[in-house]
Image: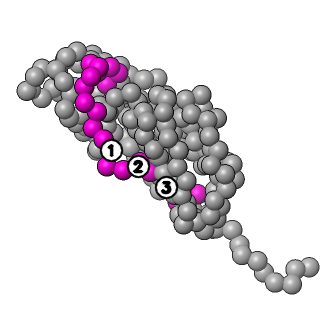
Amino acid sequence: MYGEYGPGSLPAVTPPPVNELANVVLYLDSVPSGFPVPRAAGPAEIVQRHETFVPHVLAVLRGARVEFPNQDPIFHNVFSLSTARTFDLGRYPEGTSKSIVFDRAGVVQVFCHIHSDMSAIVLVLENPFFTTPDSGHYVISGVPPGDYSLTAWHERIRPIVNRVHVAAGEATRLDLDIPIPADSSGR
């Protein structure tokens, strides 16, 4: 029926184990106004690789530009219908990148029109005092003295909020218990 074989699809890739701590964002809810905001070294990035968005969760400061480079040998079409930022970057091939500015705080769910199992989240925050735990440890540097609410955010749990007092010139320790449930694949 067909004269020649055409290019096949990519072989199924077994997803690597997911480090769910990498999908947790810890952030301060409010910071005094007028505090200097550090500038990012460049645009943040969510790469499309092996039909997956990497990283799955990206926290950025409101006003940040995020690049979406395609490293797959197939087309992708990155989009979001979230109220914090709606966009559609259209289809684009391997080796190209498109970007979008996130100018409103909130949770932005990102998908691919072509690959329904691809998803990512951009968590757009109002201040630069946020981090992702590294092997269960975290540091948020340069916080001005004061009383704050520290929020632990993960897509599958309600945010966990703790009060924290930061004294001038002192390190503040706050241990958290973040009960992350397994996803639907049992990971």
Label 3 to label 1, Cα distance in Å? 18 Å
Question: According to the image, label 2 marks what residue?
Answer: 43
Disc 3 marks a residue whose amino acid type is Val
Counting other residues with Cα less than 10 Å from the Cα at mark 1, is it few (<14), some (14-19), or many (20 or more)? few
Q: Which mark is residue 47?
A: 3
Assign a secondary structure to mark 3.
Answer: strand
Asked if the residues shown at circle 2 and circle 3 are in contact, with their CB atoms under 8 angstroms apart, the answer is no
Determine whether, in the image, residue 169 is placed left or right of residue 12: left
Determine whether, in the image, residue 30 is placed left or right of residue 23: left
Residue that extends furthest to the right in the rendered view of this protein: 1
Name the residue at 33% across, 39% down. Answer: 132
Asked if the residues shown at circle 2 and circle 1 are in contact, with their CB atoms under 8 angstroms apart, the answer is yes
Percent across and percent down for residue 35 are 25, 25
User: Magenta stretch containing residue 165, yes or no?
Assistant: no
Q: Which residues are magenta?
A: 28-53
Question: According to the image, label 1 marks what residue?
Answer: 40
Q: Is residue 85 above or below residue 2?
A: above
Disc 2 marks a residue whose amino acid type is Pro
Label 2 to label 3, Cα distance in Å? 12 Å
Assign a secondary structure to mark 2.
Answer: loop
Assign a secondary structure to mark 1.
Answer: loop
Q: Is residue 114 visible?
A: yes
Mark nearest the camera among 3 and 1 is 1
